[in-house]
Image (cartoon, helix red, strand yellow):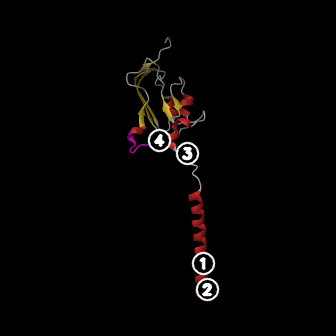
């Protein structure tokens, strides 16, 4: 009786192994349907609501619309954004940590000046976390005045 159960389990396991190998060989011989990512970078069309990276647009005079009010920092659910200013309406640094961003867009939706926005640039792979912290305002940039 014990020998019969052993033989049945052995035959059953060999049968399941053969089924798995058959499925593996079928998938191995089928044509590949995956996209070749590095070669098709410019061909991909993104949806309008796709969020990948936060930026602060600057004009040709290196001016931005951020008034350093800090509303984006207050509405960020996990502290991804840090706004530092030395005086009212003078932005020193606008730091953004893309490594901890949840891409919820609460910062862009609540910004009264529409100073920050999301782009479709999604390539952020790095070996360390350091390059994922970005300063959004450019060096030497200033606030765009109403007359300009």
* In magenta segment, residue 126: yes
Q: Residue at x 39, y 38 (%)?
A: 131
Secondary structure beneath dot 2 equals helix
Q: Which residue is mark 3?
A: 35
- Of the two numbered discs 1 and 4 on the same chain, state the one appearing first in sequence: 1
- Of the two numbered discs 3 and 1 on the same chain, state the one appearing first in sequence: 1
Q: Which residue is mark 1?
A: 11
Residue at the far bottom in the pictured view: 1
Secondary structure beneath dot 4 equals loop
Q: Residue at x 57, y 62 (%)?
A: 25
Mark 2 vs mark 4, foreground winner is: 2
- Give 44 or 114, whichever is nearer the viewer: 44
* In magenta segment, residue 61: no
- Of the two numbered discs 2 and 3 on the same chain, state the one appearing first in sequence: 2
Gap between marks 1 and 2 measured at Cα: 11 Å
Q: Which residue is mark 4?
A: 100
Gap between marks 1 and 4 measured at Cα: 52 Å
Determine which quarter of the picture holds residue 1: bottom right
Q: Which residue is mark 2?
A: 4
The spot of residue 117 in percent (x, y) is 52, 29
Gap between marks 3 and 4 measured at Cα: 28 Å
Gap between marks 2 and 4 measured at Cα: 59 Å
Q: Which residues, given as a range, are shown in magenta?
A: 124-130
């Amino acid at each position: 009786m014990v020998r019969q159960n052993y033989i049945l389990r052995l035959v059953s396991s060999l049968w399941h192994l053969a089924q798995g190998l058959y499925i593996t060989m079928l998938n191995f011989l089928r044509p590949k349907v995956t996209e070749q990512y590095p070669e098709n970078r410019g061909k991909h069309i993104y949806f309008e609501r796709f969020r990948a990276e936060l930026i602060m647009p600057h004009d040709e005079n290196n001016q931005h619309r951020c008034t350093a009010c800090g509303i984006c920092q207050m509405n960020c659910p996990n502290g991804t954004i840090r706004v530092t200013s030395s005086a009212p309406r003078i932005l020193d640094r606008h730091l953004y940590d893309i490594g901890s961003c949840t891409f919820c867009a609460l910062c862009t939706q609540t910004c009264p000046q529409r100073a920050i926005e999301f782009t479709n640039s999604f390539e952020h792979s790095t070996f360390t976390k350091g390059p994922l912290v970005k300063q959004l305002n450019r060096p030497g940039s200033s606030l765009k005045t109403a007359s300009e």
